[in-house]
Image (tube, helix red, strand yellow):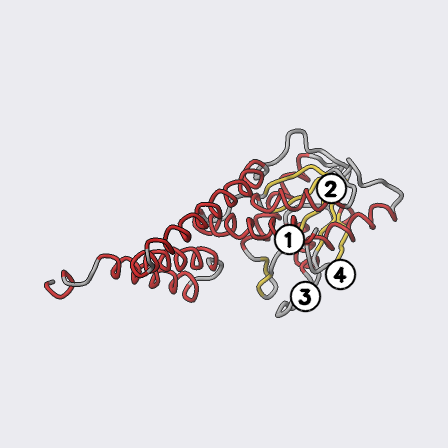
Amino acid sequence: MKFFSKIPLWCISSLLLIIAALIFRFAMRGYAYIAHSLTFFAALIIMHRFFSKTLWRITAILVCIGLVYFIIVEIPIVKNARTDNNPERDYLVVLGAAVHGDRPSLALENRLKGAVDYLKKYPDSTVIVSGGQGKGEYCSEADIMYDYLVEHGIAPERIIKEDKSTSTKENLLFSFDIIRDRGDDPDGNVAIVSSCYHLFRAKSIAKMLDVEAAGVAGPWDYPVATLNYFIREAFGVTHLWVFGW
Protein backbone atom coordinates (compact mmCIF):
# COMPACT_ATOMS: atom_id res chain seq x y z
CA MET A 1 0.00 0.00 0.00
CA LYS A 2 2.87 2.37 0.81
CA PHE A 3 4.31 1.68 -2.63
CA PHE A 4 1.08 2.67 -4.38
CA SER A 5 0.68 5.75 -2.19
CA LYS A 6 3.95 7.05 -3.63
CA ILE A 7 2.74 6.77 -7.24
CA PRO A 8 1.34 10.09 -8.54
CA LEU A 9 -2.41 10.18 -9.17
CA TRP A 10 -1.90 11.26 -12.79
CA CYS A 11 0.24 8.20 -13.39
CA ILE A 12 -2.30 5.80 -11.87
CA SER A 13 -5.19 7.44 -13.78
CA SER A 14 -3.46 7.34 -17.15
CA LEU A 15 -2.28 3.76 -16.58
CA LEU A 16 -5.79 2.57 -15.70
CA LEU A 17 -7.19 4.28 -18.79
CA ILE A 18 -4.57 2.64 -21.00
CA ILE A 19 -5.26 -0.79 -19.48
CA ALA A 20 -9.00 -0.31 -20.05
CA ALA A 21 -8.29 0.79 -23.63
CA LEU A 22 -6.23 -2.35 -24.28
CA ILE A 23 -9.05 -4.53 -22.92
CA PHE A 24 -11.67 -2.84 -25.11
CA ARG A 25 -9.39 -2.95 -28.15
CA PHE A 26 -7.99 -6.47 -28.00
CA ALA A 27 -10.14 -8.53 -25.61
CA MET A 28 -13.54 -7.42 -26.89
CA ARG A 29 -15.00 -7.19 -30.39
CA GLY A 30 -16.55 -3.97 -31.66
CA TYR A 31 -15.28 -1.48 -29.08
CA ALA A 32 -12.34 0.09 -30.93
CA TYR A 33 -13.63 3.67 -30.74
CA ILE A 34 -14.13 3.46 -26.99
CA ALA A 35 -10.56 2.17 -26.78
CA HIS A 36 -9.32 5.11 -28.86
CA SER A 37 -11.25 7.54 -26.66
CA LEU A 38 -9.77 6.11 -23.47
CA THR A 39 -6.28 6.30 -24.96
CA PHE A 40 -6.93 9.93 -25.90
CA PHE A 41 -7.97 10.81 -22.35
CA ALA A 42 -4.87 9.08 -20.98
CA ALA A 43 -2.74 11.10 -23.39
CA LEU A 44 -4.41 14.32 -22.19
CA ILE A 45 -3.52 13.50 -18.59
CA ILE A 46 0.09 12.90 -19.55
CA MET A 47 0.22 16.08 -21.65
CA HIS A 48 -1.21 18.09 -18.77
CA ARG A 49 1.58 16.78 -16.58
CA PHE A 50 4.50 17.40 -18.94
CA PHE A 51 3.49 20.24 -21.30
CA SER A 52 4.39 23.82 -20.54
CA LYS A 53 1.52 26.09 -19.50
CA THR A 54 1.41 27.75 -22.91
CA LEU A 55 1.46 24.48 -24.84
CA TRP A 56 -1.18 22.99 -22.54
CA ARG A 57 -3.47 25.99 -23.05
CA ILE A 58 -3.18 25.59 -26.82
CA THR A 59 -3.91 21.88 -26.47
CA ALA A 60 -6.92 22.56 -24.23
CA ILE A 61 -8.34 25.08 -26.71
CA LEU A 62 -7.97 22.60 -29.59
CA VAL A 63 -9.60 19.85 -27.54
CA CYS A 64 -12.52 22.13 -26.68
CA ILE A 65 -12.97 23.03 -30.35
CA GLY A 66 -12.94 19.33 -31.23
CA LEU A 67 -15.46 18.57 -28.50
CA VAL A 68 -17.82 21.29 -29.73
CA TYR A 69 -17.54 19.94 -33.29
CA PHE A 70 -18.19 16.40 -32.04
CA ILE A 71 -21.38 17.56 -30.28
CA ILE A 72 -22.53 19.40 -33.42
CA VAL A 73 -22.05 16.24 -35.50
CA GLU A 74 -23.77 14.03 -32.95
CA ILE A 75 -26.92 16.17 -32.78
CA PRO A 76 -28.35 15.05 -36.16
CA ILE A 77 -27.07 11.51 -35.60
CA VAL A 78 -28.97 11.22 -32.31
CA LYS A 79 -31.99 13.10 -33.66
CA ASN A 80 -32.39 10.58 -36.50
CA ALA A 81 -31.70 7.49 -34.37
CA ARG A 82 -35.33 6.39 -34.44
CA THR A 83 -38.01 5.26 -36.84
CA ASP A 84 -39.66 8.13 -38.71
CA ASN A 85 -43.35 8.82 -38.33
CA ASN A 86 -45.55 7.10 -40.92
CA PRO A 87 -42.71 5.12 -42.56
CA GLU A 88 -44.88 3.00 -44.83
CA ARG A 89 -43.42 2.83 -48.34
CA ASP A 90 -43.70 0.46 -51.30
CA TYR A 91 -40.06 -0.58 -50.89
CA LEU A 92 -37.96 -1.35 -47.85
CA VAL A 93 -34.16 -1.43 -48.25
CA VAL A 94 -32.27 -3.35 -45.56
CA LEU A 95 -28.64 -2.23 -45.38
CA GLY A 96 -26.09 -4.98 -44.93
CA ALA A 97 -23.59 -5.43 -42.11
CA ALA A 98 -21.02 -8.04 -41.17
CA VAL A 99 -21.84 -11.73 -41.07
CA HIS A 100 -20.05 -14.41 -39.06
CA GLY A 101 -19.92 -17.65 -40.98
CA ASP A 102 -23.49 -18.28 -42.03
CA ARG A 103 -25.05 -16.15 -39.31
CA PRO A 104 -25.70 -12.42 -39.16
CA SER A 105 -23.70 -10.28 -36.76
CA LEU A 106 -25.58 -8.67 -33.88
CA ALA A 107 -25.80 -5.39 -35.80
CA LEU A 108 -27.21 -7.11 -38.87
CA GLU A 109 -29.61 -9.25 -36.84
CA ASN A 110 -31.01 -6.13 -35.18
CA ARG A 111 -31.54 -4.55 -38.61
CA LEU A 112 -33.33 -7.71 -39.72
CA LYS A 113 -35.53 -7.70 -36.63
CA GLY A 114 -36.54 -4.17 -37.55
CA ALA A 115 -37.24 -5.32 -41.10
CA VAL A 116 -39.41 -8.25 -39.95
CA ASP A 117 -41.49 -5.99 -37.73
CA TYR A 118 -41.91 -3.48 -40.56
CA LEU A 119 -42.84 -6.06 -43.18
CA LYS A 120 -45.43 -7.67 -40.92
CA LYS A 121 -46.92 -4.26 -40.15
CA TYR A 122 -46.94 -3.23 -43.83
CA PRO A 123 -47.70 -6.42 -45.81
CA ASP A 124 -47.79 -4.66 -49.19
CA SER A 125 -44.14 -3.55 -49.04
CA THR A 126 -41.43 -5.25 -51.06
CA VAL A 127 -38.04 -5.64 -49.38
CA ILE A 128 -34.60 -5.36 -50.95
CA VAL A 129 -31.83 -6.97 -48.90
CA SER A 130 -28.62 -5.24 -49.87
CA GLY A 131 -25.08 -6.43 -49.20
CA GLY A 132 -22.31 -8.19 -51.08
CA GLN A 133 -19.77 -10.73 -49.89
CA GLY A 134 -17.16 -9.13 -47.66
CA LYS A 135 -13.66 -10.28 -46.86
CA GLY A 136 -13.75 -13.43 -44.74
CA GLU A 137 -17.48 -13.96 -45.33
CA TYR A 138 -18.63 -17.32 -46.70
CA CYS A 139 -21.54 -15.89 -48.67
CA SER A 140 -23.11 -12.56 -49.44
CA GLU A 141 -24.85 -10.53 -46.76
CA ALA A 142 -27.93 -10.50 -49.01
CA ASP A 143 -28.06 -14.33 -48.91
CA ILE A 144 -27.90 -14.34 -45.11
CA MET A 145 -30.59 -11.65 -44.89
CA TYR A 146 -32.84 -13.48 -47.36
CA ASP A 147 -32.62 -16.72 -45.33
CA TYR A 148 -33.28 -14.87 -42.06
CA LEU A 149 -36.39 -13.13 -43.38
CA VAL A 150 -37.80 -16.34 -44.84
CA GLU A 151 -37.14 -18.17 -41.56
CA HIS A 152 -39.08 -15.43 -39.75
CA GLY A 153 -42.18 -15.65 -41.87
CA ILE A 154 -41.58 -13.24 -44.77
CA ALA A 155 -42.77 -14.64 -48.10
CA PRO A 156 -39.86 -15.23 -50.53
CA GLU A 157 -41.71 -13.45 -53.35
CA ARG A 158 -41.56 -10.21 -51.33
CA ILE A 159 -37.76 -10.34 -51.10
CA ILE A 160 -35.29 -9.06 -53.71
CA LYS A 161 -31.56 -9.70 -53.29
CA GLU A 162 -28.94 -7.09 -54.16
CA ASP A 163 -25.64 -8.91 -53.57
CA LYS A 164 -22.98 -6.75 -55.26
CA SER A 165 -22.66 -3.72 -52.97
CA THR A 166 -19.70 -3.13 -50.64
CA SER A 167 -20.64 0.19 -49.01
CA THR A 168 -23.67 2.17 -47.88
CA LYS A 169 -23.51 4.26 -51.05
CA GLU A 170 -23.56 1.13 -53.22
CA ASN A 171 -26.29 -0.44 -51.04
CA LEU A 172 -28.56 2.46 -51.87
CA LEU A 173 -27.41 3.15 -55.43
CA PHE A 174 -27.83 -0.45 -56.56
CA SER A 175 -31.12 -0.85 -54.69
CA PHE A 176 -32.53 2.31 -56.27
CA ASP A 177 -31.46 0.98 -59.68
CA ILE A 178 -33.42 -2.21 -59.00
CA ILE A 179 -36.51 -0.16 -58.16
CA ARG A 180 -36.15 1.88 -61.35
CA ASP A 181 -35.69 -1.31 -63.40
CA ARG A 182 -39.06 -2.42 -62.02
CA GLY A 183 -40.61 0.75 -63.42
CA ASP A 184 -40.93 2.62 -60.12
CA ASP A 185 -39.42 5.83 -58.82
CA PRO A 186 -37.53 5.40 -55.52
CA ASP A 187 -37.92 9.06 -54.52
CA GLY A 188 -40.45 9.20 -51.70
CA ASN A 189 -41.16 5.51 -52.19
CA VAL A 190 -38.44 3.90 -50.05
CA ALA A 191 -37.85 3.22 -46.36
CA ILE A 192 -34.35 2.31 -45.17
CA VAL A 193 -33.71 -0.10 -42.32
CA SER A 194 -30.41 0.29 -40.50
CA SER A 195 -28.91 0.58 -37.04
CA CYS A 196 -30.23 3.62 -35.17
CA TYR A 197 -26.85 5.38 -35.16
CA HIS A 198 -26.43 4.86 -38.92
CA LEU A 199 -29.76 6.24 -40.11
CA PHE A 200 -28.71 9.89 -40.44
CA ARG A 201 -25.80 9.02 -42.73
CA ALA A 202 -27.88 6.53 -44.72
CA LYS A 203 -30.68 9.04 -45.29
CA SER A 204 -28.15 11.75 -46.16
CA ILE A 205 -26.55 9.53 -48.82
CA ALA A 206 -30.00 8.70 -50.20
CA LYS A 207 -30.69 12.43 -50.47
CA MET A 208 -27.42 12.91 -52.36
CA LEU A 209 -28.76 10.29 -54.77
CA ASP A 210 -31.93 12.42 -55.17
CA VAL A 211 -34.09 10.09 -53.10
CA GLU A 212 -36.08 11.20 -50.08
CA ALA A 213 -36.30 8.12 -47.85
CA ALA A 214 -37.90 7.26 -44.52
CA GLY A 215 -35.76 5.77 -41.77
CA VAL A 216 -36.55 2.60 -39.84
CA ALA A 217 -34.37 1.84 -36.80
CA GLY A 218 -33.54 -1.68 -35.77
CA PRO A 219 -33.38 -2.51 -32.05
CA TRP A 220 -30.43 -1.03 -30.14
CA ASP A 221 -27.30 -3.07 -29.50
CA TYR A 222 -25.81 -3.46 -26.02
CA PRO A 223 -25.47 0.02 -24.42
CA VAL A 224 -21.65 0.16 -24.41
CA ALA A 225 -21.47 -1.18 -27.97
CA THR A 226 -24.05 1.39 -29.06
CA LEU A 227 -21.97 4.15 -27.48
CA ASN A 228 -18.97 2.91 -29.45
CA TYR A 229 -20.93 3.05 -32.69
CA PHE A 230 -22.26 6.54 -32.01
CA ILE A 231 -18.66 7.71 -31.53
CA ARG A 232 -17.60 5.96 -34.73
CA GLU A 233 -20.50 7.45 -36.65
CA ALA A 234 -19.22 10.98 -35.99
CA PHE A 235 -16.16 10.10 -38.07
CA GLY A 236 -18.34 8.50 -40.76
CA VAL A 237 -20.50 11.62 -41.03
CA THR A 238 -17.40 13.83 -41.14
CA HIS A 239 -16.06 11.73 -44.01
CA LEU A 240 -19.41 12.12 -45.76
CA TRP A 241 -19.39 15.91 -45.34
CA VAL A 242 -15.78 16.27 -46.49
CA PHE A 243 -15.63 13.78 -49.35
CA GLY A 244 -19.29 13.60 -50.37
CA TRP A 245 -19.82 9.87 -49.58
Q: Earlier in the sequence, mark 1 or mark 4?
A: 1
Image depth: mark 4 or mark 3 in front: 4
**Residue 43 in which image quadrant:** bottom left
The residue carrying pointer 3 sits among few (fewer than 14), some (14 to 19) or many (20 or more) residues within 10 Å by Cα, namely some
Image depth: mark 3 or mark 2 in front: 2
Image depth: mark 1 or mark 4 in front: 4
Image depth: mark 3 or mark 1 in front: 3
Q: Secondary structure at mark 4?
A: loop
The percent position of residue 73, horizontal first and vertical second, equals 55, 43
Q: Is residue 43 left or right of residue 191?
A: left
Residue in the image at 33% along x and 63% along y = 19
Q: How far apart are the two marked residues, 1 and 4, measured between alpha carbons?
A: 19 Å
Q: Earlier in the sequence, mark 2 or mark 4?
A: 4
Q: Earlier in the sequence, mark 3 or mark 2?
A: 3
What residue is disc 4 on? 164
What residue is disc 1 on? 148
